[in-house]
Image: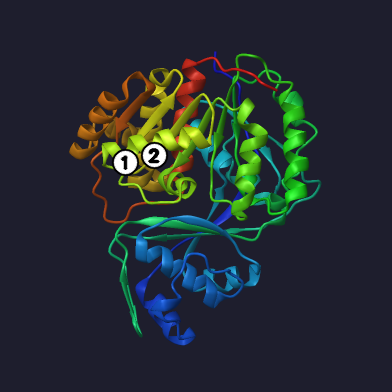
């Protein structure tokens, strides 16, 4: 029997676009942007500031998520490129990946419209806190490795492919919880918490966290609660979420960008010594039973019963890698081919060395050797979560409750 999975807390419609050098070169010239202005900390209120933000990330090959004060500048920028309309939010993308794997779920949404109704898989039930249809598209910007922007005194080339998320979304910013959430949790075996990164007001966040804790009192004792981190629109609120939920989280997941943001410094992801120190430091900051870190080179579980999550780690890697290569169009055949693909040599060596150094406290699996001309960089972390939770739901591993 398939376990009951509840995925929350928000969701959205995404406008996905891929950057092109000619358009960015032209915008750099039109807006007279200089290299000295390229900083990821820029406030985004105009299209010029949006371009500066994108270029600062492209220069480093980084990914991120930002609040944008003007929805008009998002629309203006999106109008310069061909775009796809898809569904987004960690919980929604995870649900769609789980559906492919034959694992149904129930979603908690804060915004609903005809696009969502049309694109959600038939086996995804949902509840929604909104009392009327709303549409606040998120801008998802992809760029390929090697993409070059050369205009004025700017000459940069992306060292890695990645994606950026720009948001002006009152529904997710409010993150109102449905009165039905508690009853939907009564029979849950797995519960995903995500989306609080969009909340920008401290009082609103505290109210939502308190309400969530109340709903979670309905959870059965054997449930596994998985929290997936994200780029907070107000970085100072991240700690508030951790403080409120740390006692009721079994697994805390995050990617390499979020890992380094928490630590405040870069980490060489193929240095055993640096990663071991990073995991220990992260555990000191986030005191949960198990940390799960997913990166482009490897994915690892660190903490209590880490070895029990090997199958889930592997499924997360397979699904995220298949999406990286084939995007939304991948089939079960692509999935099976990925499972038999060769792993990256340096990642295999790293994973073995990290486990040897840290012992049973860590389980690390290497990523695949992938060489794709035009990879999909949108939703990879969400796909990992979907694969991880699908394996968890089908195999099961008991949680603990502190509500």
The numbered dot on residue 274 is 1
> Could you tell me which quadrant the N terminus lies in?
top right
Res 124 seen here: no
**How much space separates mark 1 and mark 2, taking CA atoms?**
6 Å
Q: How many marks?
A: 2
The location of residue 211, given as percent across then percent down, is 77, 35
Q: Nearer the viewer, residue 342 or 256?
A: 256
Q: Quadrant of residue 129?
A: top right
Check disc 1 and report its element: helix, strand or loop.
Answer: helix
Is the residue 81 above or below the residue 111 in the image?
below
Q: Indicate the position of residue 44 as horizontal and vertical percent values.
A: 58, 69
Q: Residue at x 33, y 44 (%)?
A: 296
SS at mark 2?
Answer: helix
Residue 172 in the image: state x and y as whole percent. Answer: 68, 50
**Residue matched to label 2:** 278
Which mark is drawn over residue 166? Answer: none
- The residue positioned 44% from the left and 37% from the top of the image is 281
Residue drawn 72% across and 56% down?
170
Q: Are marks 1 and 2 in contact (CB under 8 Å)?
A: yes
Q: Which image quarter holds the C terminus?
A: top right
* 392 sits to left or right of 295: right
């Amino acid at each position: 029997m398939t376990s009951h999975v509840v995925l929350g807390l928000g969701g959205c419609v995404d406008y996905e676009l891929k950057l092109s050098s000619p358009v960015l070169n032209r915008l750099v010239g039109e807006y007279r942007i200089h290299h000295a202005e390229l900083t990821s900390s820029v406030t985004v209120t105009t299209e010029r500031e949006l371009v500066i933000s994108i270029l600062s990330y492209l220069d480093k090959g980084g990914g991120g998520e930002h609040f944008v004060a003007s929805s008009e500048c998002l629309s203006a920028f999106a109008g310069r490129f061909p775009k796809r309309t898809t569904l987004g939010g960690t919980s929604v993308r995870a649900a769609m990946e789980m559906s492919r794997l034959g694992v149904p779920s129930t979603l908690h949404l804060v915004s609903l419209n005809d696009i969502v109704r049309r694109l959600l898989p038939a086996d995804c039930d949902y509840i929604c806190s909104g009392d009327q249809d709303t549409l606040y598209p998120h801008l998802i910007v992809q760029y390929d490795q090697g993409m070059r922007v050369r205009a004025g005194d700017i000459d940069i080339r992306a060292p890695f492919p990645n994606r950026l998320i720009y948001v002006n979304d009152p529904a997710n910013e409010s993150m109102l919880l449905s009165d039905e959430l508690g009853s939907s949790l009564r029979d849950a075996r797995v519960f995903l918490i995500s989306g609080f990164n969009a909340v920008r007001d401290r009082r609103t966040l505290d109210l939502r966290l308190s309400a969530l804790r109340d709903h979670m009192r309905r959870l059965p004792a054997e449930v596994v609660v998985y929290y997936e981190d994200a780029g907070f629109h107000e970085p100072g609120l991240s700690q508030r979420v951790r403080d409120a939920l740390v006692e009721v989280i079994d697994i805390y997941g995050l990617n390499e960008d979020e890992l380094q943001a928490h630590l405040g410094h870069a980490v060489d992801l193929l240095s055993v010594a640096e990663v071991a120190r990073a995991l220990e430091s992260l555990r000191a900051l986030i005191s949960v039973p198990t940390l799960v870190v997913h990166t482009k080179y490897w994915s690892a579980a660190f903490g209590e019963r880490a070895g029990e999550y090997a199958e889930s780690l592997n499924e997360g890697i397979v699904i995220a890698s298949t999406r990286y290569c084939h995007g939304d169009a991948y089939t079960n055949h692509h999935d099976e081919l990925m499972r038999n693909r060769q792993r990256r040599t340096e990642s295999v060596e790293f994973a073995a060395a990290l486990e040897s150094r840290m012992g049973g406290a860590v389980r690390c699996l290497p990523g695949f050797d992938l060489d794709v001309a035009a990879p999909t960089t949108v939703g990879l972390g969400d796909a990992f979560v979907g694969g991880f939770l699908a394996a968890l739901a089908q195999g099961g591993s008991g949680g603990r409750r502190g509500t």
